[in-house]
Amino acid sequence: MSQNHISETMIDRLVDGELTEQEQRELLTACEAHPERWKDMALAYVEAQTWRTELSNAVKEPQTPPTILRMEDSVTPRSQLSSTSPSSTRHRSKSWRMLQVAAMLFLSLTVGYGVGTINLDSPEQPRGSNVAVEPTAPINGEQLVVWVPDQESGGLQPMQVPVNNVTNLDRAKLNQHQELSRELSNALTDDGHEVTQHRTWHPVQLRDGRGAFIPTDNINVQFNGYQ
């Protein structure tokens, strides 16, 4: 294998553990003939470790989620809602892209599950007043703007979520979390990852003063292939 064949993709595949033993030997032998490539390989390992650390911190600290939740009249990104995008443009392999998808699931997985609102200091509704209102119907078309990570740009993008009226809160349902599909869970496990999940609730305030909680399924994907 010549220096021309020591591509960034080959180094990434080595870091992600996707090369066969024969391919690993060929790549390491080529690096011995071209010592300057050892630096690129070391930087690739440092980059991968940094990404794993950042993703691990993002899912282990739900009390400071990397998003800002607020009510907006229009969907317009604000200058203060910015996110530091990775400086690297290195091509990531399939297993690493699955980690990025898991990070996106941190907020987006349960957005479609529904947003339950809780009336705070509001007068009691007359009996039978909510008969004509479906429990999951949006309240007067009200929308909540949720800022979620944009995988392509590395910044934030707005997502509109309907505010639903929940009259009878079922604690058992509140504690349920959206499970990953068996296919995705098995694929992550087979690829050397350990997946853990738990649910957190993020309080927000609506424009009329009512309180609302957004359920968030936190998914921690830990790669154990190197252990």
Image: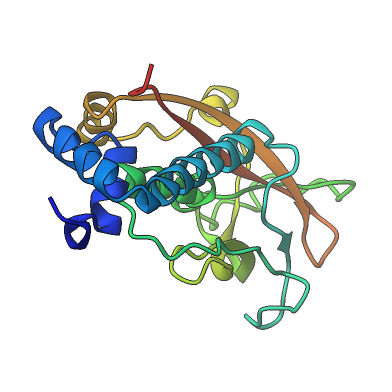
- 225 left or right, relative to 78: left
Q: Evaluate whether residue 113 shows in this view.
A: no
- The answer to whether residue 184 is above or below residue 145 is above
Observer-nearest of 2 and 151: 2
- Taking the view exactly as shown, the residue that stands out farthest to the left is 22
- The answer to whether residue 154 is above or below residue 23 is below
On the image, which quarter does residue 8 sit in? bottom left
Give the residue displayed 62% in from the left and 62% down from the top: 146
- Taking the view exactly as shown, the residue that stands out farthest to the top is 227
Tell me residue 83's x, y (percent): 66, 64
Tell me residue 88's x, y (percent): 49, 62
Tell me residue 66's x, y (percent): 67, 52
- The answer to whether residue 150 is above or below residue 127 is below
- What colour scheme has been applied to the protein in the rendered image? rainbow
- Taking the view exactly as shown, the residue that stands out farthest to the right is 121
Numbered disc total:
0
On the image, which quarter does residue 68 sit in? bottom right
Give the residue displayed 63% in from the left and 34% down from the top: 200
Q: Evaluate whether residue 96 shows in this view.
A: yes
- 11 left or right, relative to 27: right
Observer-nearest of 128 and 70: 70
Give the residue displayed 53% in from the left and 66% down from the top: 154
Image quarter of the C terminus:
top left
Tell me residue 111's x, y (percent): 50, 52
